[in-house]
Image (cartoon, helix red, strand yellow):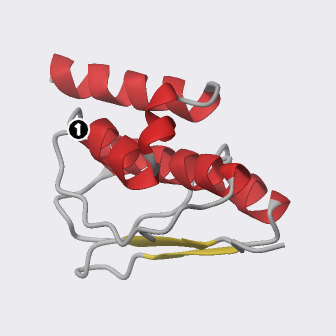
Amino acid sequence: MAKLGTAVAELRQIAHGLRPASLDDGLAVAVAAMLRTVPITVDLDICPDPLPDDVTLTAYYVVSEAVANAVKHADDGHGGAVLPPTSSIPDRVAALRGTWRVDSERGRGTIVEAALPCAS
């Protein structure tokens, strides 16, 4: 249980911190490194193409917060999740004029999806 608490604390620090140096190697590499610290399975679909820095950073923070929430609040994959009112995901995504959704029907797990515009 202590390991879980440490993983959540680390993810929250990332979600509220500055640009992680791991993003220098691309979003997929940075997210993979982050996910090595969490005790849950996460399936991701990440664009392999280079992205603008603001999109990369926002996507990284969205993933880190969504994973932190899943680690803290997951109910064995049964769904029924809601975005906490303190979540920064809506503001981060809206700042880039993107869209997001949480699909968490009971009994089917949870999908968090953010679509961020990648061109000016």
Q: Is residue 20 visible?
A: yes
In the foreground, 107 or 60: 60
Mark 1: secondary structure:
loop
Residue 48: % across, % down = 41, 68
Residue 15: % across, % down = 56, 35
- Point out the image quarter for the C terminus: bottom right
In the foreground, 84 or 41: 41
Q: Residue at x 50, y 37 (%)?
A: 24
Residue 60 left/right relative to 37: right
Residue 108 left/right relative to 58: left
Residue 100 left/right relative to 102: right
In the foreground, 40 or 81: 40
Q: Is residue 85 visible?
A: no
- Point out the image quarter for the N terminus: top left
The residue type indicated by label 1 comes to Val
Q: Is residue 3 above or below residue 115?
A: above
Give the total of numbered labels. 1
Q: Residue at x 20, y 66 (%)?
A: 77
Q: Is residue 90 above or below residue 3?
A: below
Few, some or many residues within 10 Å of mark 1 (<14, 14–19, 20+): many
Residue 49 left/right relative to 41: right
Q: Residue at x 62, y 46 (%)?
A: 57
Q: Quadrant of residue 86?
A: top right
Task: Check disc 1 and report the residue beneath it.
Answer: 38
Q: Residue at x 40, y 23 (%)?
A: 10
Residue 18: % across, % down = 64, 26
